[in-house]
Image (cartoon, grey):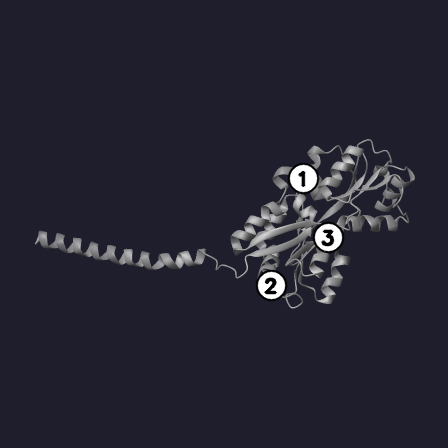
Amino acid sequence: MKKRSTTFIALLLSMVMLVFVGCTQQKAPQEDAKQEAPAPAVKDVILATTTSTQDSGLLDVLKPEFEKQTGHNLKIIAVGTGAALQMGEKGEADVLLTHAPKSEQPLVDSGVAINYSLVMHNDFVIVGPENDPAGIKNANTTAEAVKMIADNGAIFVSRGDDSGTHKKELDLWKEAQIEPKGQNWYQESGTGMGATLNIASEKQGYTLTDRATYLAQKDNLKLTILLQGDKSLLNIYHVMNVNPEKFDKVNAEGGKAFVDFMVAKETQDIIAKFGVDQYGEPLFFADANK
């Protein structure tokens, strides 16, 4: 009787093991299917964006995340915002990430840009040599600060590239009722933010910069923040994809995927934390869905 009981128990255990193995084999393909995103029809997504998102290092963090989540290959063209918007107008990019709301609005109104979405903000600051030859640390407003620079003939290095930063700078001169172009003290670099900061540092001049790029490069610069906090210095970023109904070569799926990625909670959390470990403060503030 004891031998028959032992045989029965062994047989029962064998049957349980067979059922378990069968269930495991059935679940495995389902679990693998969940992990593998379907391959996109067109892998390459062309992003035209401002140099500040590149020079700050933010895109170095976001690019691999986007590619991992979507299967797309993000091709980044970092230029001034003006040039990025022109690429959008010509259908030469799939998606845009820029920071000049007044210049972005015509593309939205014309239907060239769709899914126009707020992503994040930081601010502009005026940096210059620590000895502050124009004395702008004592200015009450940004307009007053740039007027002091002009009155003292202190070197000011402009990007001069129709970027979002350059557009903001021109607004400041206009507010101060000053025409700087052609003045000996006013020099245009025609380059991105990182290179312009380096030139200003070498010449010990002033420049307008987004805070993120300055913080990312300040260890290599002989420049300090001299004016900040004025409401006119707010720097707002939007993302939008180029309308495929206007340009048949635009990657509609890829462009929309990048817009959705940028406003997703997980990406917004990455943006909100970016820079905190290294600089003790965020380089951007996440704004999607606000």
Percent position of residue 258, x then y = 60, 57
* Mark 2 residue element: helix
Residue at (67% x, 43% y) in the render: 55
Of the residues under marks 2 and 1, which one precedes in the sequence?
A: 1
Give the distance between the C-alpha atoms of the residues marked 3 and 2, in whole angstroms: 21 Å
- Mark 2, other Cα within 10 Å: few <14 / some 14–19 / many ≥20: some
* Mark 3 residue element: helix
Amino acid at circle 2? Ala
Mark 2 highlights which residue?
Answer: 252
- Mark 1, other Cα within 10 Å: few <14 / some 14–19 / many ≥20: some
Mark 3 highlights which residue?
Answer: 81
Amino acid at circle 1? Ala
Horizontal placement of 205 versus 256: left or right?
A: right
Q: Are marks 3 and 2 in contact (CB under 8 Å)?
A: no
- Mark 3, other Cα within 10 Å: few <14 / some 14–19 / many ≥20: many
Percent position of residue 124, x then y = 76, 46
Give above or below for 275 relative to 41: above
Give the distance between the C-alpha atoms of the residues marked 3 and 1, in whole angstroms: 20 Å
Percent position of residue 172, x then y = 84, 49
Residue 231 in view in this figure = no
Q: Is label 2 or label 1 in front? A: 2
Residue 47 in view in this figure = yes
Mark 1 highlights which residue?
Answer: 216
Give above or below for 177 relative to 206: below
Residue at (70% x, 33% y) in the render: 220
